[in-house]
Amino acid sequence: MTVLSVACDSRPYVFLGLIAAIFIGYEVPYASTTLIIALIIQMTLSLDGMSFKGSDFKEYKNEMIWCLVASFIVNMGITLATGYFFKDDLGLWYGWVMLAIAPCAISTVTAAIYMNGDMKMSVLGLVMVYIVSIALTPILSHIMIGDAVNPLEILKYILLFIIVPFALTIPLRRLHLKRTPKVIGINAMMFCMVFMGLGSRHDYLWEHVDSSLFLVIACIVRICIIGTLLIVIMRKVKVKRENAVIYSTMMYWKNSSMMASMCMALLGATYPEASLPCVISLVVEAAWFSILTKLMSKIWPEEKPVATSTAS
């Protein structure tokens, strides 16, 4: 194993961020701001290189609809169901609701690369999900948690996290970055987000070990167990594998870092623990992704093309 291969592997970054957050902490007054900056950098690097044509929207119309169903119905329903056990703790419940209404992560496109999914479909599906989330996420927050968070504030942050990264990709293209530096940059921002997000709630983690462990268990159930079950079901009902790769990640992978920063900025003063479901989800999602990219070949191996022979 070379130094470069380790640098391109997300697992060491997640592990180091987790250890630093638990044992060192990140108790600074501007934690939400630094988390927002790290997320915008990561999203910009992830978006760099994405391309599509206008005609692609018509070709992939049905697939984009299913991406919306996967992200906003299946994913949101599963997240709310697993988070319902924390309903008596208002701060944690608000955090779960914020997590549930979040769009899927931009890294679903990365999943398509690693697991040989339909790349164009992943890009178009992601674009559609984020366009819809601009209107839908503030509406859902108002329906589910009322005045706890101002919907206009959520709209402001959603626009910030969508428009700014897309705009920054325009000058970034001039650098013609190769895949390796982009992957290292994305991983470095992952370390920052895990460290800053979890570390900012360092005291709560140690004071409420039981609640923290229950949050981890709930996230493992939502992401790992139910996520695997959904993949098996899609294989049974004969969904195209290259499409199922996209649907499956959209069914469990939330933009947890986006919602963690929102919780810290909008709920941090009254409910400081609200960001924990999002931050712990971020850690479990990142760990599970590194496992799933290897496990997918066993759960659902790609079909090898049948060799044909010609008569001499």
Image: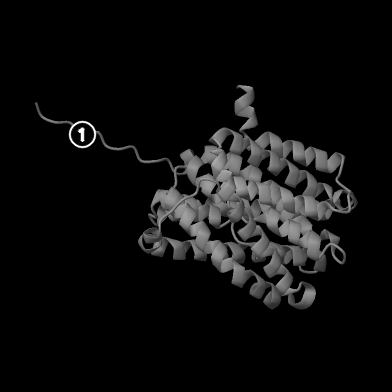
The quarter of the rendered structure image containing the N terminus is top right
Q: Does residue 264 appear anywhere in the picture?
A: yes
SS category of the residue bearing label 1: loop
Q: Residue furthest left?
A: 312
Lateral position of residue 30 relative to residue 131, left or right: right
Q: Residue at x 74, y 53 (%)?
A: 36
Q: Is residue 232 visible?
A: no
Q: What is the total number of numbered labels drawn onto the structure image?
A: 1
Instruction: Give the residue type that dot 1 points to.
Output: Thr
Percent position of residue 179, x then y = 54, 36
Viewer-nearest residue: 182 or 271 = 182
Q: Is residue 271 above or below residue 122?
A: below
Question: Viewer-proximal residue, 163 or 242?
Answer: 163
Query: Looking at the rendering, in which quadrant would you find the C terminus?
Result: top left
Locate residue 269, reporting x and y percent.
87, 64
Residue drawn at x 17%, y 31% as measured from the top left = 309
Question: Which residue is label 1 attached to?
Answer: 308
Query: Looking at the image, which residue is at 64% across and 62% down?
Result: 79
Colour pattern of the rendering: one colour
Could you say where residue 128 lies in the image, as x and y percent from the top left?
50, 63
Q: Residue at x 75, y 57 (%)?
A: 261
